[in-house]
Image: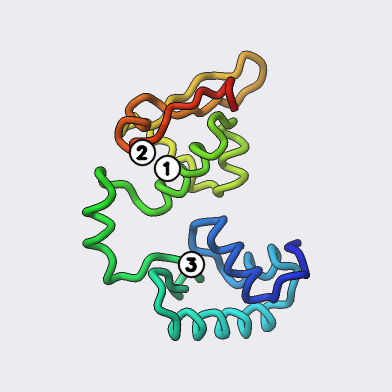
Amino acid sequence: MVSTELSLPAQLEAILYLKGRCLSLAELSELAGCERDEVELALITLMADYAHRDTALEIRQESAGYSLQLRQNLAALVQELVPVDLSTASLRTLATVALKKRILQSELVDLRGSGAYDHIKELLQHGFIERKRQSEGRSFWISLTEKFHRTFALNNVSAEAA
């Protein structure tokens, strides 16, 4: 259940941003702790708000549900700014790893959803993350690589310093 200090449209915006994937009305309703019709009305309000803003983001309705995405007309800018061909969802997963410095794969999947398994595979292939098995337990530790720091020109702060 999300904080009630925020309006329902703001709560849904936060949920869509944090999940980083398409969510059905049922999923949104469960995560927000509201009835489906309330969520649907709040989504319409949120979509109208985004339509009238001068912003790079939009709420996109697809057959599977709703997602918060960059506007379609920004595809060229994204390709220019992102030095590799990573999906927006993979970039969000990478940003989550970058914020945490070191994270258990199971925790990352809890935060980002089951699609994170595909993101992790893609990020491993590009060499932006590394994965090491936990000494105790069944999950893996995921951390950033030197290639990540070179590519994204960030200071390399080790997990121990964090």
Tag 3 and tag 2, C-beta contact below 8 Å: no
Image quadrant where residue 150 sits? top left
Query: Given the image, on which type of amino acid does mark 3 rest?
Result: Ser
* Color theme of the render: rainbow
Crowding at dot 2, Cα within 10 Å, few <14 / some 14-19 / many 20+, comes out as some
Q: Residue furthest top?
A: 135
Crowding at dot 3, Cα within 10 Å, few <14 / some 14-19 / many 20+, comes out as many
C-alpha distance separating marks 1 and 2: 5 Å
Find residue 119 and name its label: 1
Identify the secondary structure beneath mark 2. Answer: helix
C-alpha distance separating marks 3 and 2: 21 Å
Identify the secondary structure beneath mark 1. Answer: helix
Query: Given the image, on which type of amino acid does mark 2 rest?
Result: Glu
Query: In this orientation, which residue lies closer to the viewer: 160 or 111?
Result: 160
Quarter of the rendering occupied by the N terminus: bottom right
Find residue 67 and name its label: 3
69, above or below 93, in the image: below
150, above or below 134, in the image: below
Query: In this orientation, which residue lies closer to the viewer: 2 or 33?
Result: 2
x and y percentages locating residue 31 in the rendered image:
69, 63
x and y percentages locating residue 65 in the rendered image:
51, 70
Q: Which residue is mark 2?
A: 122
Crowding at dot 1, Cα within 10 Å, few <14 / some 14-19 / many 20+, comes out as many
